[in-house]
Image (cartoon, rainbow, N blue to C red):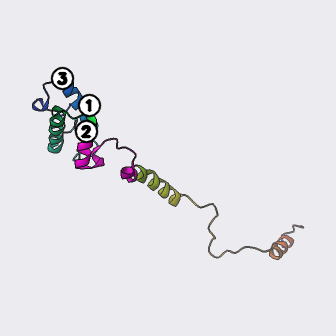
Amino acid sequence: MLAVEPSERLADPALEARARSLSKELRCLVCQNQSIDDSNADLAHDLRVLLRQRLAAGDSDRQVIDYVAARYGMFVLLDPPFAPVTWLLWLAPPVLSWALGAAAAPGTAPAPRPGRRRVDREESSRAARLLGDRR
């Protein structure tokens, strides 16, 4: 069920359709992973009303999104653009995954076992003679 209340709806069906489309692109800052179109939070309600006011005033879709993002930050966008401002948002998850994977993966060379040392050629030949292996 959608959270848009009848009192929020615009009389013009074309503007209302734009408002609904835009509200699906904006994140509820209270619910975090829910659009303002789906959220019952008070802040989501306020953002839906603000969005409709901007549309009724004649703003384009881009102007509305830019206005809300300027006011609340790029985090309000459910699909933020890949830009210098959002690089951390986009790159942190893969970098952290790679770093954790690299830290958890065993190294290529086995770690030396305590109390063991490498055997040189002379010791290897002596061991072979004692065990009956002629090299």
Q: Which residue is mark 1?
A: 21
Mark 2: few/some/many CA within 10 Å (<14, 14-19, 20+)? few
Q: Which residue is mark 2?
A: 63
Label 1 element class: helix
Magenta-colored span: 65-89
Q: Earlier in the sequence, mark 1 or mark 3?
A: 3
Single out the mark in the foreground, 2 or 1: 2
Identify whether 110 is placed above or below 117.
above
- Check the picture and name the quadrant holding the N terminus: top left
* Residue at x 78% of width, y 74% of height: 120
Mark 3: few/some/many CA within 10 Å (<14, 14-19, 20+)? few
Question: Observer-nearest residue: 72 or 96?
Answer: 72
Q: Earlier in the sequence, mark 3 or mark 2?
A: 3
Mark 1: few/some/many CA within 10 Å (<14, 14-19, 20+)? few
Answer with left or right where residue 43 lies relative to residue 126. left
Q: Is residue 107 visible?
A: yes
Disc 3 residue type?
Pro
Residue 2 x %, y % = 20, 32
Q: Is residue 34 visible?
A: no
* Residue at x 22% of width, y 39% of height: 36
Residue 135 x %, y % = 89, 67
What is the magenta segment's predominant secondary structure?
A: helix
